[in-house]
Image (cartoon, helix red, strand yellow):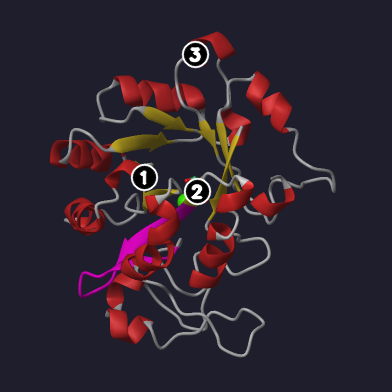
Amino acid sequence: MKIWAHRGCSQLYPENTLLAFEKAAALFDRGLTGIELDVQLTRDGEIVVIHDERIDRTTDGYGFVRDYTLSELKTFHIHSGRTEAERIPTLTEVLDLIEAPMRKGFRLNIELKNGVYPYPGMEEKVHALVERYGLHQQVVYSSFHARSLSVMRSIDPHVEIGILDGRVSDCLYKLKGGCGAGVLHPAGWGIDLPKDELAGYTVRAWFGGHLYPEKPTGGKMNLQALEDKGVTDVFLNEPEAYL
Ligand code: G3P
Ligand code: CA
């Protein structure tokens, strides 16, 4: 089972921050496969790393990411319990931070958060940035928005693309529909096909819905049970507890 840090090490540190990504990159030597993060676009077209379309939940600000310029967004704080607050990072800042481990094999899943607002041009911008770093071999792009993945595939026939959905059957349906994806990113609760129908696919499961999803009853998640269902990778908020 391959383990990824979901939004960085987001159980113990604020999600999608340089702090959470730094902690995840430090786990590369312990076998962490990579980091998953979410990107949105600012009013001035910069790629920022934040899960929600709004900044209210994770910062001390209010409103939509797309209504602020990057410099305006940088004035908001993400409290981490340390003296210095974290700020919403750009994708460039994250790539600078984890470039060295990525050159040694550490991976990055960039989730294009364009299901609510399509952010025209986002695919080209993100692809061009990763291209500048020469890190495409280490990156997997994903989205719930199949049309966006088609755009990414038309930009580059070689990059790895994962289709996100709740059920793995829906992921497979979208994949076979020609969105350009090659791997499946279903929810952990959505493995609704027999293992033999998933044979040959990379199946990366995520666990959303509530705080600390991988530890719902105080015990650890059973990774073996997931592997027995055909899951090959998991995105965990607290990967350090499982490595
Ligand atoms: O990419 C897997 C997972 O992160 C998708 O759900 O809401 O956590 O972005 P969400
Ligand atoms: Ca995500």
Front tag of 3 and 2: 2
Residue 100 disc label: none
Percent x, y for residue 129?
23, 59
For mark 3, give the secondary structure: loop
Q: Quarter holding the C terminus? A: top right
- Alpha carbon distance from label 2 to label 1: 9 Å
Magenta region: 36-50
Is residue 141 visible in the rendered image? The answer is no
Task: Looking at the image, tell me whether mark 2 or mark 1 is earlier in sequence order.
Answer: 2
Number of marks drawn:
3
Left or right placement of residue 215 versus residue 148 in this view: right
Task: Looking at the image, tell me whether mark 3 or mark 2 is earlier in sequence order.
Answer: 2
Left or right placement of residue 199 versus residue 82 in this view: left
Residue with the mark numbered 2: 34
Q: Is residue 100 above or below residue 105?
A: below
Residue with the mark numbered 3: 199
Residue in the picture at 85% in, 48% down: 218
Percent x, y for residue 224?
72, 27
Query: Would you say residue 140 sits in the magenta stretch?
Result: no
Q: Amino acid at mark 2?
A: Gly
Q: Residues within 10 Å of mark 2 (few under 14, many from 20)?
A: many
Residue with the mark numbered 1: 138
- Alpha carbon distance from label 1 to label 3: 23 Å
Residue 66 location, quadrant: bottom left
In contact (CB < 8 Å): disc 1 and disc 3: no
Q: Residues within 10 Å of mark 3 (few under 14, many from 20)?
A: few
Residue in the picture at 67% in, 19% down: 228
In contact (CB < 8 Å): disc 2 and disc 1: yes
For mark 1, give the secondary structure: helix
**Majority secondary structure of magenta residues:** strand
Q: Is residue 135 above or below residue 19?
A: above
Q: Is residue 86 above or below residue 27?
A: below
